[in-house]
Image (tube, grey):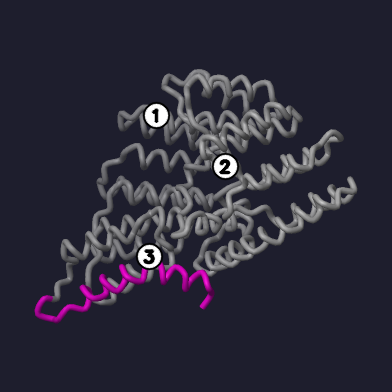
Amino acid sequence: MKRVVRWNKAFHNNAWFSIKRWLTTDEQNFSSQLSLIEEQTLLRCLDMRKSAPHFTKRLVEDIYVEGKKPSGTVILKALGIATRWRLYQDAYYYYELSRGLGLRPASAFYSNLITLCGCRKDWNSAYRFYQEVVHEGVPADYLLYRSLLFCCAVLGDSDRIKYVVSLMQKEGLSLDETCHAILMECCRIRKDYEEGLNIFENMPLNRTHRSFQVVFSICRDMNDYTKAMYYYEQFCTANINFSEISISLLLDIAIKHQHWDQVWTLFNKSIQQGVHPMPFIYFQFALGLLQMKQMDRSQVYHILNQKPIRMFIPNIQYKALIAEAKARGDVSLVTDLTMLSNKDRMMEMKVESYARELQTMGCLLPFVELKHLAVYRYQSAKGSAPPPPLWNLGCLDSLGVLSKL
């Protein structure tokens, strides 16, 4: 079995054997229900931020095979992990298991399923799950309607957005800040940029990083540096910290317009906040510096060394940097870039291996986007899970959703 699978098993080994010991108690004490201690231990293992999807499904399956009945809470945790890894087949397994056990899932359960339908651009399945919520009499809440709006936004479908908003109004729910950000994202995907900015300007709520993330993306798509800096001033006034996406969007547009003083200011500020831009920014920044006549080679090396150890720049982008350094006749920089490239290539190969594992598990995203997810497995010594799909507001058409059906 591949190294990454062995690594995941080793990480969860102690927890698994302690649960397995409880699952195989003698028949006199056997019960179809998990005991309180069993369930508490299980829920600690199913940490949505760290649990590997391989481990999660195996654990839930083995509990069921051993004759135990997973609770709704356990299945909801497992579904949350499947949602973060965009594993629709695993999610549907948990749905079928829940129905087979006669459980009555809450709104959060269906919200995860509908969100995954959005990642697959599958409105019909999303709406079928919503109709099931109505039929089962499950109380609908913001989680449910955000997931429906998310599904519409990915499709850029303004008519369905209006329909979902009308459903919310019937439930007496007004649009919260996250809902406004989703509406803005729908406008961005439809290239109705002015309407997206209008929603932002007229939002009757305090703005958070979500709506700013989308407004920066709109400015980037419009290629409007002036507007981006106008909204960045509001962002600073609101005293909001960068996210990985928001700083990447701002740096992207500043680099394209070659406002290098602003690029350095943004870059250093994000590093001070402990937030690192996405890998493509390091490449664009370094390439931009290389192409400047007054470039100092130490600056290029400094930028690339600011990259976290578990983040990599793709080998093909290093080739472009090395070609530029060769064209300038900078032998020392070529040597430095080659060493960095070899180091990053090892991490890239690990990520590609895990991306292929996700493919075998049924994740239907394009391989490039699978690599974006797989990177999270190596972001710490114990690994991490990707953030929920809604975290990608501002780039839903390029991260975490199917590019084509």
Residue under label 2:
276
Per the image, label 2 sits on a secondary structure element best described as: loop
Q: Mark 3: few, some, or many residues within 10 Å (few <14, many ≥20)? A: many
Disc marking residue 56: 3
Q: Mark 2: few, some, or many residues within 10 Å (few <14, many ≥20)? A: many
x%, y% of residue 373? Answer: 54, 55
Disc marking residue 176: 1
Query: In whole angstroms, how far apart are the C-alphas of marks 2 and 1?
Result: 28 Å
In the visual, does 228 lie left or right of 40? right
Contact, mark 1 vs mark 3 (Cβ under 8 Å): no
In the visual, does 306 lie left or right of 63? right
Contact, mark 3 vs mark 2 (Cβ under 8 Å): no
Magenta span: 1-29
Per the image, label 3 sits on a secondary structure element best described as: helix
The one of 249 and 402 positioned closer to us in this rendering: 249
Tell which tag, 1 or 3, sits nearer the viewer: 3
